[in-house]
Amino acid sequence: MENIFINPGKEQWAELTKRPAFDYAALEAIVQPVLQDVKETGDEAVKKYAAKFDKVQLQDLFVTAAEMEEAIAMVNEELKLAIQLSENNIRLFHESQKDAVQKITTTNGVVCWRKSVAIQNVGLYIPGGTAPLFSTILMLGIPAQIAGCSNIVMCTPSNAAGKVNPVILYTAQLLGIKNIFKIGGVQAIASMAYGTQTIPAVNKIFGPGNQYVTAAKQLVNREGIAIDMPAGPSELAVFADNSSIAAFVAADLLSQAEHGTDSQVLLVATSTQIIKEVNSQIDIQLKELPRKEIAAAALKHSRFIVFENEKTAFDFLNDYAPEHLIIASENAIELCEQVINAGSVFLGNYSPESAGDYASGTNHTLPTNGFAKAYSAVSVDSFVKKITFQQLSETGIQNIGPSIELMATAEGLQAHKNAVTLRIKKS
Amino acid sequence: MENIFINPGKEQWAELTKRPAFDYAALEAIVQPVLQDVKETGDEAVKKYAAKFDKVQLQDLFVTAAEMEEAIAMVNEELKLAIQLSENNIRLFHESQKDAVQKITTTNGVVCWRKSVAIQNVGLYIPGGTAPLFSTILMLGIPAQIAGCSNIVMCTPSNAAGKVNPVILYTAQLLGIKNIFKIGGVQAIASMAYGTQTIPAVNKIFGPGNQYVTAAKQLVNREGIAIDMPAGPSELAVFADNSSIAAFVAADLLSQAEHGTDSQVLLVATSTQIIKEVNSQIDIQLKELPRKEIAAAALKHSRFIVFENEKTAFDFLNDYAPEHLIIASENAIELCEQVINAGSVFLGNYSPESAGDYASGTNHTLPTNGFAKAYSAVSVDSFVKKITFQQLSETGIQNIGPSIELMATAEGLQAHKNAVTLRIKKS
């Protein structure tokens, strides 16, 4: 490990919290014509790009009931039970995110409230590729169901034989998701954004993906299709002190590093001893990993930073605003009061990132790239609009009408005033 | 009124719910160099563009305490009281949007919760121009304060003499907003996005503006600065039936129409009689308005639509997804159950849009352009991130660990499994 920094001054923080930069302009130039083509010719374009990019000749885009049955039979019972446990926990936590309607009388005769109403049509993108992310179906599908979305569309790429990963199909059917299309990449995002002969258009698109998928989501977002959040490579910061367990910290850093060569891994510690121990543990554990090349490449641009005190360490961590933050300390509950910017926080020595990735109940769709300074994890909130309502009685307009008249006049909006004056006179 | 449609079939709805299209690509080509210039040369560029676009030679960008004092003395006491009433109502309603932390035990030993933490640095853009929108300061500043944002920056253009509208300054000081800069347009958005020698950079930018401001917000959004929501021209739909009061409906439509020539006005009714009455009322009321040219131009592309029944009327309204929806009916409370897509809804004959624009307590920063299908009004939510936390005990990892191991293995992520296996063995 060469990337060790001892007590870096604030002038170095910008460099130390930097993320890899992507050339989105270049990506957009590649992605835009594909979007346009799907917009214009629909299914025909989708099949063309599936053949070109995914090397698959698709007849039907829709996953049939027979394919679903076949897939479900292929998943072993132990894994099914694991997915069900995870589903239960995610459901319990996300159920608590529902908002009750609260009517507020702001002035006598003036009642205001908000009501959460589901976004009607939502699209979930589930990547295939090197890791079939069936856990993401739980993370997106459960809050969509709790919100009450009427139409849930799911796109996921098939393999070259036109088959979708069976665990992906099992998880989808567990949630009752029926509109599943065998489409990946940019053409999937385009299909859900514009609709095709087969795929219905949606109001909001969710889900992770590679750089092309990310660029496609950003492009359709500009045309008015909502997206879950801007995305970047996955990242983890761990805070460690003398109460941390080095083997656990090393395992957590490696679990992040194996995601991709562009994964970001940061260790921030108040002890040089723990950094040394973590380093030797990484050396031991790395060798055993099937994805060790990926993890090793990601570790090359990882950073290990020592600060003299906790306050400065957390100032730095807030400046970095990590997607995942593990506070690997026996003192985690107190320390977490200092967290201002993070996506999801894991407290103590027995809360690995893996727990949140799969089964603790929190959502794993999180803001990366420093977006945790302004964005939140996906939640039930992401699948609803909160519509405001107000009802004024005749007394209500008498009470607040004169103020509205004055303010409208001061803003130079006479018709706004009139709408009130007429009502005051009549009531 | 020529734009009357009787029972239009669904095949006509796409046309009837259409918004005016803007050529954002053309706008962006104008806006991008200004953004870049401010990014590179800061205050120098800001002053240059203030001279060029706003015809003002600015010495200092910051509004001083002396200027503040002077402005406050210029606002009459009656208007101050009106603004205070409005502030009180907006505060009461938005206080109810705060979330309490709710700890959920998803499995024995696994506790998850969300905590709302303020976005640290927020920027509020308050347009000057034809209408000095001081009410927008209340709508953005109050939720920012309730959320607990540490740094609130406000930009608003000065007049040619370098003075900011006194009511704008009064309202800002009422909320305790101190960082106020005399900057308008694209250069204001650029200053808050990138920071200059004088203006601090922020994490999220809020506020309405003209097409250039909107394009600037969208462009900085792509660079990772969050924005409140995508924007378009303001719009109102009114649902009317035989219990509506025609003079009120006409006044409401005109209050929307006076906003700008591009304002959208829709009247959806279950009675042709009410449409006729509203039309004659519009003729009478329009003549008296100071902004009658603007209102008349907006009315030219308004639409009056009659449907046979309420169900179809609300299907159409949901398809349109209006920013503001007035249900001008004695039956409003029952009818509002049918609302799926809208920004803010006004119930009954005594709830004009003006009430929500100024003083009922709801927020007037709302999704336009059909974005109400997926976006919500600005609220306290807009000024916080909801950070998730999880804490597993040794029992917790024993309970959910085996499921995580199975799922991680099935996703091909061995290091994710390891992080759990090590802990299960040790606990």
Image: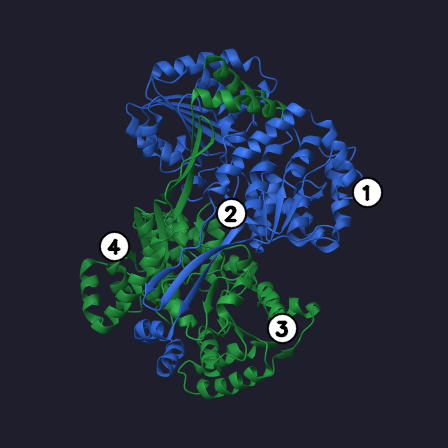
Chain colours: A green, B blue
What x and y, as percent, mark residue A321?
Answer: 55, 63
Q: Tell me which numbered mark, 3 or 4, is placed earlier along the sequence.
A: 4
Q: Which of A102 and A68 is in front in this view?
A: A102
In 3D space, how far apart are the residues under numbered discs 3 and 4 (Cα atoms)?
A: 53 Å
* Secondary element at image label 4: loop
In 3D space, how far apart are the residues under numbered discs 4 and 2 (Cα atoms)?
A: 33 Å
Q: Do the residues at pointers 1 and 3 share their chain?
A: no
Q: Which of A36 and B89 is in front in this view?
A: B89
Please state the chain letter of the residue tagged with numbered disc 4 in the rendered image.
A
**Residues marked 1 and 2 touching at CB (< 8 Å):** no
Give the foreground label among 1 and 2: 2
Identity, as a three-letter code, of the amino acid under mark 1: Gln
Please state the chain letter of the residue tagged with numbered disc 1 in the rendered image.
B
What x and y, as percent, mark residue B83?
Answer: 60, 30
Q: Residue at x 22, y 67 (%)?
A: A71
Pointer 4 residue = A178
Q: Quadrant of residue B108?
A: bottom left
Q: Residue at x 48, y 67 (%)?
A: A333
Give the foreground label among 1 and 3: 3
- Left or right of A183? Residue B154 is right
Give the foreground label among 4 and 2: 2
- Left or right of B355? Residue B72 is right
Identity, as a three-letter code, of the amino acid under mark 2: Ser
Identity, as a three-letter code, of the amino acid under mark 4: Lys
Pointer 1 residue = B59
Image mark for residue A309: 3
In 3D space, how far apart are the residues under numbered discs 3 and 2 (Cα atoms)?
A: 33 Å
Please state the chain letter of the residue tagged with numbered disc 3 in the rendered image.
A
Q: Do the residues at pointers 4 and 2 share their chain?
A: no
Q: Residues within 10 Å of mark 1 (few under 14, many from 20)?
A: few
Q: How crowded is mark 3: few (under 14 residues within 10 Å), some or many (20 or more)?
A: few
